[in-house]
Image: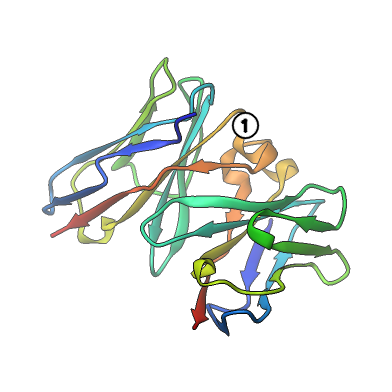
Amino acid sequence: KAGVTQTPRYLIKTRGQQVTLSCSPISGHRSVSWYQQTPGQGLQFLFEYFSETQRNKGNFPGRFSGRQFSNSRSEMNVSTLELGDSALYLCASSPAGTGITGELFFGEGSRLTVL
Amino acid sequence: AQSVTQLDSHVSVSEGTPVLLRCNYSSSYSPSLFWYVQHPNKGLQLLLKYTSAATLVKGINGFEAEFKKSETSFHLTKPSAHMSDAAEYFCVVSDVWYSGGGADGLTFGKGTHLIIQP
C-alpha cells in the first residue's frame, strides 16, 4: 500500500510569491491534516480536511489556505510569502477523525525556503 | 486545555546502553498518548500509543513506554540503543473530549533529539 506522497519535496521561492503544495493520502484515508515544522516553533497544526470540508484550523493567518478534493487529495496554498514561512510542511492522513485515534501517517514533507 | 513537555531537548547515549526519553503531560480528561519518531529528512512515524488499556505499551523497534497517571508521565524507553535509533522523538497527547475528534486535539511536544555514540 502506497504511503502519503507530498510534492514537491523541495522548493525555493522569493518573498511575495505564492506556493501550492500537494498531498496524496493513503488510499481509503479521508482525513488529511497539515503541519508546519520549524526549529524554533516545532510542529504546529495548520488545518485538517475531512471529506472535502475543513474541519479544524490552527492559529495561522489567512495567507495559509487549503482544500481537499473528492479523491481525498489535498493542497495547501501560501500567498504573499514571508521569510518566516520557510519550513518543512508535513501532510498526514488518517482513516477517520484524526483526534479520535491520534494515529497519523505522515508524508516526507515539502521543504520550503523563502529568500 | 492540554499540554505536553519533553524534559530533554537532546539525549546522548552510547550504542548498546539504555535509552530514556522523558515526557510529562497535562490534560483535563483521560488522554491518549503517543510517541512518534522522525528520522532526518523524513516524516513522522508512530512508535507506540496508549489509549487507556495496559499502562505498559510496547511499540516498534524494541521501544516501550509506561503511562503513570499519578506522575502524569509517559516516558519512552529502550533497553539497548542502536545506531539506527538516532532521530527526533515527539511525545503527543490527544484529548478527544477537548477536540471533539479533530486534529486540533493533538498537541505535540517540542521533540527530543536522540544521539547515539558509537
- Residue at image coords 82%, 51%: B30
Is A34 displayed left or right of B52 in the figure? left
- Residue at image coords 20%, 41%: A19
Q: How many marks?
A: 1
Q: x, y (%) of residue A47?
A: 46, 39
Is A23 displayed left or right of B4 in the figure? left
Circle 1 SS class? loop
Give the crowd class for mark 1: few <14, some 14-19, many >=20 residues within 10 Å: many
Is A82 displayed left or right of A103 in the figure? left
**For the C terminus of chain A, which image quadrant?**
bottom left
Q: x, y (%) of residue A36?
A: 39, 52
Output the chain of dot 1: A
Query: Looking at the picture, which amino acid does disc 1 mark?
Result: Gly
Residue A4 visible in image: yes
Which quadrant of the figure has residue B89? bottom right
- Residue at image coords 51%, 72%: B83
* Viewer-proximal residue among B90 and B107: B90
Which quadrant of the figure has residue A100? top right
Is B84 displayed left or right of A86 in the figure? right
Q: x, y (%) of residue B73?
A: 77, 68
- Residue at image coords 88%, 69%: B70
User: What residue occupies the far top of the structure in this picture?
Assistant: A70
Residue B111 visible in image: no
**Location of residue A27 with respect to B33 vertically, above or below:** above
Which quadrant of the figure has residue A88? bottom left
Q: x, y (%) of residue B53?
A: 87, 48
Q: Please give the residue where the numbered disc 1 appears in the rendered image.
A: A97
